[in-house]
Image: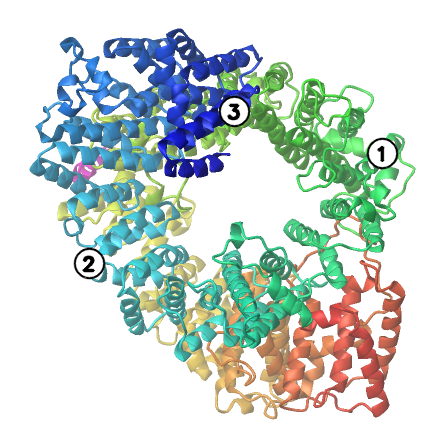
């Protein structure tokens, strides 16, 4: 309607005045005659908002408006609750016609004022309605009162309505509606305003005191912004409104204003307030603060003299530049000040690199971008200050920095600086290091240039860069290269044939990539490519009607898209891993959205006509892009049963586009009912998805087209409910017998999905009678399941311990008539116990989720009709009771998590309905929980209150989501919890949770909740106070709960950590920010510290460490606070420097070092002055010095060095010695300190920090000479040997020792059983420096191998791994020598040594081993790669040596399919280093898929003597792996997960067969492989398998061939049959008869649609 009004307004403006008046009067007459007041008011408001012409006419009908508003007002008041929608339009209408209403009917206006105030004071009023009310109220008061009267009455209203929300709305209305001439004193108004009505009312001089209305509320505004509350954003928005008015006033006054109008004190106070909130967690506040500060500075520039303002800005800028670049507030201030100060004046040495610090953390990146953007307007400044900095960050080794530079700085630069691409490319040419990052940056520049339109076509050189990137080992490089192909500024630009082929190859080679960033980028770019193909094909197809010239181009696109569709479907067949399936489905979803179910809206919004309907007709006429195929239904149904939820969801979404036959529906329905009987969640969810699909498919048919079975499908909800009720009744008799056949929870989950899911075609089909049945069985089921866990099914449910639950389940099993075989698994629990426990908690969770979603999605009516699907109050209460009972009496984590989620849905619905009767249910639940906590104290302390925090948290969060004017539940909850927390528990009841413990755990949940975080601010001080008091409780459980609560409070006070590194400056928070947001908090913490420090009866108060930890994350600002808070912090903390607890001393030292202004020398003097017996205090002072020395570059004077030396030498405490060492290390003076000569070193080993003291000496540069190292290594003291080895590992220069390898070999022989020594020796030999020596010196390798053969080392996997890696490096060196054949002859012992090593590598590659083992195996392969690249294997190496190499290749194939990405990347690195097949690209680094092909082809070409041992040959030619007894894919539905399931979830045996076949076929074109294969056996297997497939039926949507074993056997058979026909593979060619039989078998197999789809 609003859109129509705007169109009508345009027409009225074109009409003549007379015609316009007549049309409007007739239109308004019809509207005013409507009987429905609600509709009338909404239409009038819409007319007034969207048409100025009509609004003027509406205002003239003030009599009618007044009566309408009074009528609606009376109806609103009569209702039991205020309907926000009606109220909003009523108040809007009043505001629209305020002048007419007050002039014609002042009494009505007064009634409206009182009504509006009532609305603002009503809890739950939205911010939008509150602001509308405030504006309308101000308008009415301005019309009803003179200025003096307005000021007095407005003050009275503010005083009488103390609610913060009301005050915010009123003041917002004042400064939003009040004209500046009304707010300013009269003698500051301009002459042109004198004729205004309001100005005429302000002629009395007494009322014209300066600041009468404008400045009198500023103090209140600043106070509101300084106080944490749920209205923080609204309060700052109000302050922003005030500054806008200030700017208007300044423009009116000019520079002739009196000095008090805008002084520096006011500006500083507002700017400080903004600075303290630049990093607040309250969403939107930092941006509002930035606008406030900018507007304030603009006002100051208008009022102040130019010199004064410039001086003020320079001082601010100078202060800002002194701040740390790790502070986000610095960037906000620079964005403000740089435009005023100028680009050149704001630059200082190192500014560019300092600004680049913002890229080190996501927290500061966007703020840094805003500053960086300012300098892009000047290309000279950019090139001089930022070009090199940008390049350094693009090539950074830090992934986060590099990614932020790529995503934020680079696109902005190329878009705004014309010369930037040329400058960066020129700088890249000079880069010799990091070829991978250079390539990536080149591709990024191409990508962004294509997007900007500055690069329309690609040159041959650019294509070479792209092709290198597409096959690179780095996912970021491959992603960037793919983006270049897909990007184009013109959406209708079609990709050329070369681009299409590159895209197809890229998708096929990267479909299993598991990097989320890569997949997300590829999906985004693929979407752009599909839009280009769609728009260009649609445009060219339309042009075919005029000319056939473009038919070839359309055909090219159709062929390309058909190939994409076929490939994607082929990737969804059995045997694919999750990465393949989800990536293919996401790509397919994009394809479908663009071509199958096109809609010119949302993501498909396009310029021009991009409807692909004509193009699809063109493609279909040529047999292309036919999507609705039965085989595609089969494939997608297969993926409905996938383990991963997102795979199931997307498959179900795409299946909705199909219309299966009735026979197919019957199979799907039967399958769904079978799946929901499973104990596995994923299968139950699959069954639910299938049932919803059946509902959807049958609902799409017309009534005349109903098929047999549709009536059954239309009653799915009834069927499921009846089934569950029947099964539940059986459960009471023999629970185990029932769940052995049906786990129950799948049925209730399926019912929930079909009945309540938004996308279900049968939602809300239950009437009141069926809802009653549902509620009854749900309540009974919940009680029964809780009773099973407690063992008291006939008694009142209570909260059992874990032991009681286990005993209760055992009793259920013993009383059952069923017998389960509990063998076959070594798990700690028998299968029967697992089955019962799983069934119980799954049913509890399912009932809770049903109760939550039932309330969360169903309509609500207080008194529903019998046929209504709405929930009555009683039904809602029963649902709430189910949730409360579970969260109160259950302790199972899985059940609790599901119930908390359901409770959140339940509470959100009741709060949002705004019906008092329903909202009161939440209050009753909360009160019931609090009563339970006060009276029930039998829950175990290990539960951490279990579900209670989640229950209260969700109820409070639901109300908090309503907006700023909410929090009634929060206030009441916090008050009650604080009251309960203050009641100390009994020391003897520590094994149980006390009421105080429960209260503290619940407070923790509330504080942690993200939704509540916006409202928790006003209560932070109270909660912290309660938490500190609880630290002193005698009950451990309460102290533990308080500690967890304090941990939740810290992020709310300081904000989340920006980096994981604890000591990072990014994690520091300015003291100013905390004091601005929480003014009294620091005083509270300091008071507690003072009291704790003065209590001599305790070693340490429990609150000290948490408080010090929090304060240690604070840092002082550039200027000190007015109340000298920094010095008070130092005074309160200094006493803890002498604490007997070392952690306290560390924290206190960090704080004192930060806030103390005392000089380093003076602090050192105080340490020297300490007498004996004050070791703790001495250590604390030295820790302060250590902190100071680590934060700034210091140069110590000779006296300071002497003082530190004296402290070091005079103490016998190694903790103090270590601290002195660390101070000297920080100032690069540790080498001047000499270690003590310890006469009794063994006795000192047990002193604290002794070994750290020695380690620091070994790490100091130059502290150990070569002679000293040799002497230490030859010592009989293993401790000295270990310290020497540690030093050598840390100092590469120490490895330049003559005869080092001989020395190490001697140690390996003599100390082979000393594990610590052996590990370090092997690490030394495997170090980078010695690795280079070993690779270049064959004699050294021989010596090492001889030593390893002669030594027997201590057992241990870590030693074995290091030995294998060392042997690999030595053997590689020998194989690289020119006389390698002499070492590796048939009778050489090195051959067996080599083979044994390769067998170890093969064993370590197995997925059953740990990640470290597999990574070491990959490292061994990389170590041996150089010899494999240099040496010719075929015809040069003996068969036994080839056997060793075949082990390496088999190991590489295993590692390339490893589930860990680091292992795969390491194996891919190996494949890039070995000899490259001529059939593959020759780039230095290749992707994992190309690496697999390279290994296979290298093995096939080089290892001809042992090919039968090669995994691809063994796997592909083994006919025994082809099975005829195809398994039923429903056999595993009833089983739980078994140990060993999913050892390697990335492995894809079926798709690897395809790769093996591809490589065999490619290699057969260049040489004869002469493989042995029994063709007769293959033909026999083919006949049997084909018969089994045909017996299963081709129309069955669940063919046995689609099981993993069935599809594996089918693909193996197809590959073997095709191999038999190919020349150059088999040693004995097939006969003519065999050839005919093979062709016949292949013809039959290829009729199976999945087979050709798989081999596309």
- Graded by Cα atoms within 10 Å as few (under 14), some (14 to 19) or many (20 or more), the crowding at tag 3 reads few
| Disc assigned to residue 722 | 1
The span from disc 3 to disc 1 (Cα, nearest Å) is: 55 Å
From the viewer's perspective, tell me whether residue 1553 is left or right of residue 397: right
Camera-side residue of 257 and 523? 257
| Disc assigned to residue 381 | 2
Task: State the residue at coordinates (47%, 26%).
Answer: 26
- Graded by Cα atoms within 10 Å as few (under 14), some (14 to 19) or many (20 or more), the crowding at tag 2 reads some
Mark whose residue sits in front, 3 or 2: 3
Camera-side residue of 835 and 152? 152
- Up the image or down, 1615 lies above or below 84; here it is below
Image quarter where the C terminus lies is: bottom right
From the viewer's perspective, tell me whether residue 539 is left or right of residue 212: right
Query: What SS does tag 1 mark?
Result: helix
Q: Earlier in the sequence, mark 3 or mark 2?
A: 3
Task: Specify whether residue 189 is painted magenta.
Answer: no
Residue under circle 3?
30
């Amino acid at each position: 309607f609003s859109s129509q009004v705007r169109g009508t307004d345009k027409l009225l403006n074109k009409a003549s005045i007379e015609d316009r008046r007549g049309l409007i009067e007739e239109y308004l007459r019809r509207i005013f005659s409507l009987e429905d007041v609600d509709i009338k008011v909404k239409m009038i408001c819409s007319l007034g908002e969207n048409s100025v012409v009509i609004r003027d006419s509406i205002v003239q009908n003030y009599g009618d408006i007044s009566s309408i508003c009074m009528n609606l007002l009376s109806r609103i008041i009569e209702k039991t609750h205020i309907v926000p929608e009606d109220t909003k339009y009523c108040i809007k209408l009043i505001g629209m016609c305020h002048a007419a209403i007050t002039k014609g009917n002042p009494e009505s206006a007064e009634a409206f004022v009182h009504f509006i105030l009532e609305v603002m004071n009503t809890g739950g009023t939205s911010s939008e309605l509150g602001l509308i009310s405030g504006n309308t109220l101000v308008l009415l008061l301005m019309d009803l009162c003179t200025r003096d009267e307005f000021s007095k009455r407005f003050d009275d209203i503010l005083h009488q309505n103390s609610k913060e929300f009301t005050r915010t709305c009123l003041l917002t209305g004042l400064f939003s509606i009040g004209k500046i001439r009304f707010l300013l004193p009269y003698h500051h108004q301009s002459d042109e305003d004198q004729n205004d009505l309001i100005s005429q009312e302000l002629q009395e001089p007494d009322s014209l005191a300066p600041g009468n209305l404008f400045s009198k509320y500023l103090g209140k505004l600043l106070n509101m912004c300084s106080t944490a509350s749920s209205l923080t954003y609204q309060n700052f928005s109000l302050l922003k409104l005030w500054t806008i008015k200030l700017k208007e006033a300044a423009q009116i006054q000019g520079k002739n204003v009196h000095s008090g109008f805008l002084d520096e004190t006011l500006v500083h106070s507002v700017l400080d307030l903004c600075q303290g909130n630049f990093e607040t967690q309250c969403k939107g506040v930092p941006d509002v603060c930035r606008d406030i500060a900018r507007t304030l500075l603009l006002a100051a520039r208008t009022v102040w003299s130019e010199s004064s303002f410039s001086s003020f800005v320079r001082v601010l800028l100078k202060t800002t530049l002194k701040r740390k670049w790790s502070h986000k507030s610095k960037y906000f201030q620079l964005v403000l000040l740089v435009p005023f100060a100028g680009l050149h004046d704001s630059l200082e040495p190192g500014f560019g690199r300092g600004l680049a610090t913002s890229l080190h953390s996501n927290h500061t990146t966007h703020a840094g971008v805003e500053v960086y953007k300012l300098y892009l307007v000047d290309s000279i400044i950019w090139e001089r200050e930022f070009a090199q900095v940008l390049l350094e960050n693009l090539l950074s080794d830090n992934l986060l920095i590099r990614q932020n530079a790529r995503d934020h700085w680079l696109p902005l630069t190329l878009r705004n600086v014309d010369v930037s691409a040329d400058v960066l490319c020129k700088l890249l040419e000079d880069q010799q290091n990091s070829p991978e990052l250079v390539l990536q940056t080149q591709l990024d520049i191409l990508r962004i240039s294509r997007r900007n339109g500055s690069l329309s076509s690609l040159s041959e050189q650019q294509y070479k860069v792209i092709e290198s990137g597409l096959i690179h080992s780095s996912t970021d490089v491959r992603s960037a290269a793919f983006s270049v192909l897909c990007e184009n500024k013109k959406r209708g630009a079609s990709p050329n044939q070369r681009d299409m082929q590159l895209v197809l190859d890229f998708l096929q080679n990267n479909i299993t990539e598991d990097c989320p960033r890569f997949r997300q980028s590829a999906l985004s770019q693929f979407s752009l490519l599909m839009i280009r193909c769609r728009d260009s094909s649609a445009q060219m197809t339309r042009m075919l009607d005029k000319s056939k010239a473009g038919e070839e181009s359309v055909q090219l696109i159709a062929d390309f898209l058909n190939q994409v569709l076929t490939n994607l479907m082929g990737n969804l067949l059995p045997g694919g891993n999750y990465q393949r399936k989800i990536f293919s489905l996401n790509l397919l979803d994009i394809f479908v959205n663009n071509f199958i179910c096109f809609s010119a809206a949302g993501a498909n919004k396009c310029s021009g006509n991009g409807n692909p309907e004509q193009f699809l007709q063109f493609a279909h006429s040529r047999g292309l892009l036919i999507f609705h195929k039965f085989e595609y239904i089969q494939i997608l149904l297969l993926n409905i049963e996938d383990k991963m939820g997102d795979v199931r969801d997307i498959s179900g979404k795409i299946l909705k586009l199909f219309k299966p036959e009735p026979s197919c529906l019957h199979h799907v329905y039967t399958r769904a009912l079978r799946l929901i009987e499973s104990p596995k969640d994923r299968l139950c969810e699959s069954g639910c998805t299938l049932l919803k699909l059946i509902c959807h498919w049958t609902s799409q048919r017309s009534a005349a087209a109903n098929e047999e079975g549709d009536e059954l499908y239309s009653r799915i909800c009834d069927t499921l409910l009846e089934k569950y009720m029947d099964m539940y009744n059986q459960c009471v008799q023999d629970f185990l017998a029932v769940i052995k056949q049906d786990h129950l929870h799948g049925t209730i989950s399926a019912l929930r999905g079909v009945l309540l899911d938004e996308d279900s075609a049968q939602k809300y089909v239950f009437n009141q009678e069926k809802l009653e049945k549902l509620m009854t069985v749900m309540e009974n089921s919940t009680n029964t399941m809780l009773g099973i866990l407690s063992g008291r099914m006939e008694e009142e449910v209570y909260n059992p311990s874990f032991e009681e639950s286990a005993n209760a389940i055992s009793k259920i099993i013993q009383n059952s008539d069923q017998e389960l075989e509990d063998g076959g698994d070594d798990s700690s629990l028998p299968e029967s116990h697992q089955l019962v426990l799983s069934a119980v908690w799954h049913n509890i969770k399912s009932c809770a989720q049903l109760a939550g979603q039932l309330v969360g999605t169903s309509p609500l009516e207080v008194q529903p009709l019998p046929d209504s699907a709405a929930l009555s109050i009683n039904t809602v209460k029963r649902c709430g009771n189910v949730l409360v009972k579970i969260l109160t009496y259950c302790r199972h984590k899985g059940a609790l998590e599901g119930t908390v989620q359901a409770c959140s849905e339940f509470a959100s619905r009741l709060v949002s309905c705004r019906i008092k009767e329903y909202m009161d249910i939440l209050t009753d639940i909360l009160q019931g929980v609090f009563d339970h906590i006060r009276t029930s104290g039998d829950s175990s302390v290990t539960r951490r209150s279990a579900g209670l925090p989640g229950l209260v948290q969700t109820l409070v969060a639901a109300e908090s989501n309503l907006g700023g004017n909410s929090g009634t539940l929060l206030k009441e909850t916090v008050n009650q919890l604080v009251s309960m927390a203050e009641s100390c528990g009994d020391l003897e009841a520590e094994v149980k949770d006390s009421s105080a413990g429960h209260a503290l755990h619940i407070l923790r949940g509330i504080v942690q909740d993200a939704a509540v975080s916006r409202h928790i601010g006003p209560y932070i001080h109270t909660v912290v106070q309660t938490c500190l008091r609880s630290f002193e409780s005698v009950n451990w459980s309460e102290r533990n709960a308080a500690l967890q609560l304090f941990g939740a409070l810290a992020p709310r006070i300081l904000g989340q950590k920006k980096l994981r590194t604890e000591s990072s400056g990014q994690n520091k928070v300015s003291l100013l920010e905390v004091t601005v947001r929480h003014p009294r908090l620091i005083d509270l913490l300091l008071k507690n510290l003072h009291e704790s420090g003065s209590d001599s009866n305790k070693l340490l108060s429990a609150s000290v460490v948490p408080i010090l930890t929090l304060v240690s994350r604070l840092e002082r600002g550039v200027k000190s606070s007015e109340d000298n808070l920094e010095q008070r912090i130092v005074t309160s903390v200094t006493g803890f420097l002498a604490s007997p607890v070392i952690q306290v001393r560390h924290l206190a030292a960090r704080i004192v070092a930060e806030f103390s202004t005392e000089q380093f020398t003076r602090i050192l003097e105080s340490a020297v002055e300490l007498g004996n017996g004050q070791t703790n205090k001495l250590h604390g002072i030295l820790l302060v010095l250590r902190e100071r020395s680590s934060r700034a570059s210091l140069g110590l004077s000779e006296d300071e060095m002497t003082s530190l030396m004296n402290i070091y030498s005079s103490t016998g405490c190694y903790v103090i010695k270590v601290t002195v060492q660390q101070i000297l290390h920080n100032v690069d003076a540790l080498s001047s300190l000499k270690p003590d000569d310890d006469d009794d070193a063994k006795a000192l080993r047990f002193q604290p920090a002794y070994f750290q003291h020695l380690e620091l000496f070994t790490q100091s540069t130059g502290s150990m000479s070569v002679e000293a190292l040799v002497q230490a290594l030859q010592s009989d003291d293993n401790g000295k040997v270990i310290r020497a080895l540690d030093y050598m590992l840390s100092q590469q220069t120490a490895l330049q020792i003559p005869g080092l390898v001989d020395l190490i070999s001697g140690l390996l022989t003599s100390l082979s059983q000393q594990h610590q020594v052996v590990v370090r020796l092997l690490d030394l030999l495997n170090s980078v420096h010695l690795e280079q020596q070993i690779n270049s010196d064959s004699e050294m390798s021989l010596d090492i191998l001889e030593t390893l053969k002669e030594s027997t080392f201590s057992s241990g996997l870590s030693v074995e791994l290091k030995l294998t890696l060392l042997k690999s490096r030595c053997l590689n060196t020998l194989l690289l020598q020119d006389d390698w054949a002499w070492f590796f002859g048939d009778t050489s012992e090195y051959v067996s040594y080599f083979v044994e090593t390769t067998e170890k590598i093969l064993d370590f590659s197995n997925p059953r081993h740990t990640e470290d083992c597999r990574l070491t195996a990959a490292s061994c392969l990389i170590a041996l790669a150089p010899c494999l690249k240099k040496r010719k294997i075929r015809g040069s190496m003996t068969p036994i040596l080839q056997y060793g190499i075949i082990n390496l290749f088999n190991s590489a194939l295993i590692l390339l399919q490893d589930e860990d990405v680091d292992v795969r990347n390491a194996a891919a690195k190996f494949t890039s280093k070995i000899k490259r097949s001529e059939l593959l690209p020759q780039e230095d680094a290749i992707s994992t898929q190309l690496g697999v092909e390279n290994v296979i082809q290298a093995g096939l070409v080089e290892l001809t003597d042992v090919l039968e041992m090669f995994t691809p040959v063994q796997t592909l030619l083994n006919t025994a792996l082809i099975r005829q007894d195809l398994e039923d894919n429903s056999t595993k539905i009833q089983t739980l997960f078994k140990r060993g399931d999913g050892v390697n979830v990335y492995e894809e045996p079926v798709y690897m067969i395809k790769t093996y076949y591809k490589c065999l076929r490619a290699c057969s074109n260049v040489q004869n492989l002469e493989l042995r294969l029994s063709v007769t056996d293959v033909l026999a297997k083919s006949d049997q398998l084909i018969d089994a497939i045909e017996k299963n039926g081709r129309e069955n949507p669940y063919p046995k061939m689609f099981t993993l074993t069935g599809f594996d056997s089918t693909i193996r058979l197809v590959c073997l049959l095709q191999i038999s026909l190919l020349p150059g593979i088999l040693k004995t060619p097939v006969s003519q008869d065999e050839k005919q039989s093979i062709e016949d078998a292949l013809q039959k197999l290829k009729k199976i649609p999945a087979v050709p789809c798989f081999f596309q």
